[in-house]
Image (cartoon, grey):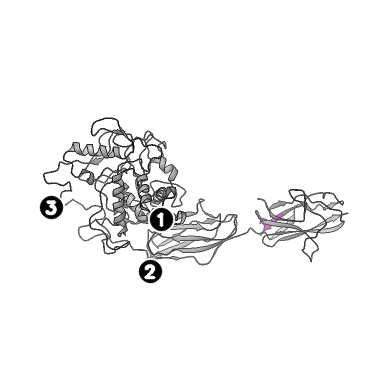
Amino acid sequence: MAAQFGRRLRRGATTTAVAAAAIAALSASQAPGAIPTGGGTGQAADVTPPPGTPVTGNSPYYTELPPLTTPDKPDSSIDLPATGPAEAGIPASVLAAYKQAEQRLAEDKPGCNLPWQLLAAIGKVESGQARGGRVDAQGTTLAPILGPVLNGVGFANISDTDHGQYDGDTTHDRAVGPMQFIPATWETWGQDANGDGTRDPNNIFDAALAAGHYLCAGGRDLSVEADLHKSILGYNHSQEYLNTVLTWLEYYRKGTHEVPDGTGVLPVGNGPAGPSSTPDPSPSSTPSKPGGSPGPKPSEPKPGDSGSPAPSKPGGPASPPPGESDGPGTPTPSPIVKRIEKTVTGTLTAVAGDVFAERAAVRAEDAAGRPVAGVPVLFRIAGDTDARFAGGGSEVTVTTGADGRATAPAVRAGEVTGDFTVRATVAVRDVAGVEYTATVTARQADGLVRTTDTELTAAPGAEFAGSVGVRATFKGAAAAGVAVTAALITSEGDATTPGQGPYFKDADGNPVRALRGLTTDANGILQLPALFADDTTGTFLLRLEAAGGATLTIELKVA
């Protein structure tokens, strides 16, 4: 929403003054209950948002509408050109981010029914799809996308909330990133969708998922028209904004296709710009005035002019816009992913607390089986487990290399044993994901020894002198976190627990002759609680068994 108003706002304006008045009036209308401070037409208004500020702080946005010619094949439209002025084309990483967010919300908030085309519509009016998909391999914009300073001069008045962390401004806030979050809203709704450990509003994967969560807030069902409208108005409280987004939503629902990153079509007018994000040069743009914001260069309409751009002069511009070509050399469409295949076979296994030796990996292929590079692959850990990728997350996005392969980071097993799944998916229609089964086994010990050789004796009815301590080892090294059971047994050949003889005490002081759920410490040591003798005399046996099969039998004498 940091972008200046597009050409639709300028249509019908007969003078620069009228255009300025229209901008001021529309800006003021975007904040409910705003009170003008000037009193004259075109004066700045106090549009300080109330509590519950919309995502963007009601910043301005692109008001261009889609072309009248719409795609005619739902969700595919393969007959449309892959680059150039075809507005239905969405940059690959941006499209993948929208579809990934839809998939995540379908799992996390299934009642919301978020369509990815809604995110695409909002992304279009907010930033021109991250300024035509100018993002790196991880989906982060090549330069920050910043809205105008929200200082109350023609825009909302929002004092700094993030100490400049996101927008670089320590006096006022600015909308940030391809989905144009103001810092305070991002702090609440920001997501780490690509699993890099950072919630970055300039990353299209993070921003798209955050926008999806915001749109789904409050238990909304976006298949219901009233909820859909509420969610869009919550993003920017303007009827014109609602109408614009709904128009693009309908357009994208009729069909779209993927274009290479960086070749998307930019809306007319300057896009979001800040200190390190300069708008692309355009014959219709002029430098910002001091203290102001970049904007379209006003022009005086001529009689009969409807406000539409004039045709290009013979010969056209010196070079075509990014992603277009007027002859040979038209960019070749990126290969289309048709499937992803596992590149690692078998089950992934690890002992609790250890790192899995094998990693989940996939290869993206086109219809001919050729590798497809630059495809964002979402790896997600699913199931009843506390295993996590390196860095602590349960999700991570990895982009395929030149060989079409993407390999997930190493997974560290937690303390929960059993099976779970590592799922790999791509945000491409009709491309099935793949799953790896991963198994966490309990920590094991192949040896148990006592820590002392003190004889364990007691008089009838007394406590045993000394205590029982054992050390567990696995392949000669201390075995930490190993589960151990300790039980009195009848004899070497009979492991049943007798009803008399030595015993432990439970929390209430009652006799118990078997303990489970014991675990060795970081040094492989286990110290048993105190043992007591009843009135029965004789020699008794205490058996300890560790996960992995190690056992130890200890004699107890009551005399």
Q: Please report the bounds of the magenta region as a residue range.
A: 471-481
| Amino acid under disc 1 | Asn
* Label tally: 3
Going by the picture, which residue comes out furthest to the top?
38
Residue type (three-letter) at the residue carrying disc 3:
Pro
Q: What residue type is labelled 2?
A: Gly
Front-lying residue, 390 or 21:
21
Packing grade of label 3 (10 A; few <14, some 14-19, many >=20) is few
Q: Which residue is drawn at 78% across and 65% down?
A: 494
Marking on residue 369: 2
* Residue at 18% from the left image edge and 44% from the top image edge: 12
Q: How crowded is mark 2: few (under 14 residues within 10 Å), some or many (20 or more)?
A: few
Per the model, the C-alpha gap separating discs 2 and 3 is 45 Å
User: Which is in the foreground here, disc 1 or disc 3?
Assistant: 1
* Residue 259 visible to the viewer: no
Q: Which secondary structure, mark 2?
A: loop
Q: Which residue lies furthest to the bottom in this view?
A: 368
Q: Mark 3 points at which residue?
A: 314
Mark 1 or mark 2: which comes first in sequence? 1
Label 1: element kind: loop
Q: Quadrant of the N terminus?
A: top left
Q: Is residue 336 depicted above or below 522 in this figure? A: below
Locate residue 85, reporting x and y percent. 24, 55
- Quick one: label 1 or label 3, which is nearer the N terminus? 1
Marking on residue 458: none
Residue occupied by mark 1? 113
Give the answer, above or below, for where 19 lies relative to 328.
above
Is 86 inside the magenta-drawn segment? Answer: no
Q: Determine the CA span between mark 1 and mark 3.
A: 49 Å
